Image (spheres, grey):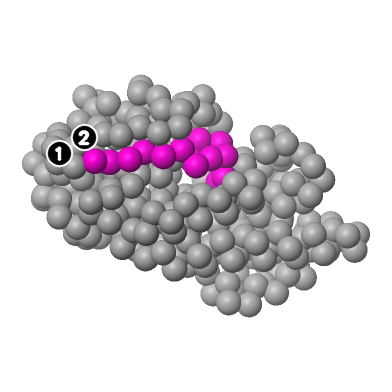
Amino acid sequence: MELRAIARDVYACLQEDRGLGYSNSGLVNRGGGLVVDTFWDLPHTREMLEAYATVWPRPAERVVNTHHNGDHCWGNQLFPQAEIIGHRLCRDLFEAAGTPAGLEVLKGLAAKPGTEPGIAEFGRRLSDWDFNGIELTPPTTILDERMELDLGGRAAHLIYVGPAHTAGDVIVHLPEEGVLFAGDILFHRCTPIGWEGTTDNWCKALDLMVELAPETVVPGHGPICDVEGPKQMKAYLQYVLSECRRFREAGLTPLEAARKIDLGPFADWTEPERLYFNVSRAYRELEGQPWDAQFDTGELFTGMMQLAKEWGRL
C-alpha cells in the first residue's frame, strides 16, 4: 500500500493490482477531510487510515463511495462520524454484491474436497481478504446527478456517470487541482469487469473524463495515469463489443467468442480472463436485454476460471 501526494492537499492511497479486490482510494485534506472510497475489508481499510493519518491527523468528515462494489465501500464502518455520500443506486444496491459472510464461506470452499474447480479457484483468490466483522454501512447522503462540495474554499464535483460499470457510478473531479478520482469507470492496465450498465454509457463516461482534462487520474484499480488511461479503456470496451457482434452473428456462444478474441495490446493487462464477464455483458446488450438484466454471477466466474485454466493462468 502506497500513499502518494498527487496535488496540494490531495493524496492517493494505492494498492498494487494483484487481482481481485485491490482497489485505490483518495484523500483531500481540506474542509474537514474527504475520503474517496474505502477498501474491501477492515484490516486493509485500517492500514489505509494509518497512511492517511500521517498527513491528516483526524478522521475525515466525509466519505464518497464511487459505487456499491464491496472493494470500494465495505470499510465504511471505520468512519463512524463521517457523512457517507453516494448515488441513490449505490445505496439501493449496497447488498447486491454479496455479503461478507458469504465471501468467507467461499474462502472456506477453496480447500474443501469436491468443490467445483472454478468456485475453488475463486475462493483461493479471496485468501488475502478477511471479511469478518464487517457491518455494511451504506451512504447516508444521496446524490442523483451532481453534487458540489466546498472543501475549505476548493470545489469537489461529484458527477453521476452510470449505469456504466455499475448502476450507481460516480466520479470525483477536483478542477483546481487537475485531479480526477475515477472509481471503477477506469481500470488502468488491468482488465475491467462489467456488471450493470452498457458499453455505450461506459464509453460516454470515459469521454467525459477526457473532456474534463485532468492532469492526474486515479483509477479504481491499477496505477495512476493521465487521460491516456481512459482512452485505452474505451478502446478495449469498443473492441470487445465489436468482436462480440461478429462472433455472435457467426453463432458462437459467449465462452466460444471469448476463446477466439485476440486481446492484442490488452493481453498483458492483469487478469485477462475477466474478458468473459465483458463478452457476456456485450451479448446481453446485443440481444437487446435491459442494462439491469439479471445474470448468473456464478456461471460467469466459472467461465472466467475456465479461460484462466485454458490460458495457463491457474
Measured from the top left, where is residue 6 in percent x and y? 22, 60
Q: Which residues are magenta?
A: 155-169
Nearer to the camera, 308 or 107: 308
Give the residue number, with chain letter if any, for mark 1. 153
Dominant secondary-structure state across the stretch colored magenta: loop
Image quarter in which the C terminus is found:
bottom right
Please name the residue shown 63% across and 77% down the image.
264
Q: Identify the residue at the far top of this view.
A: 140
Count residues near mark 2 (Cα–Cα under 10 Å), then give few for <14, some for 14-19, many for 20+: few
Distance (Cα) linking label 2 and label 1: 6 Å
Measured from the top left, where is residue 132 in percent x and y? 39, 35
Measured from the top left, where is residue 172 in percent x and y? 35, 44
Count residues near mark 1 (Cα–Cα under 10 Å), then give few for <14, some for 14-19, many for 20+: few
Please name the residue shown 79% across and 49% down the image.
286
Give the residue number, with chain letter if any, for mark 2. 150
Image quarter in which the N terminus is found:
bottom left
Q: Determine which of the numbered discs, if any, sits on residue 279 in the image.
A: none
Going by the image, does 89 lie left or right of 264?
left
Instruction: Determine whether label 2 and label 1 are within 8 Å by CB.
Output: yes
Going by the image, does 221 lie left or right of 155?
right
Nearer to the camera, 153 or 223: 153
Q: Quadrant of residue 29?
A: top left
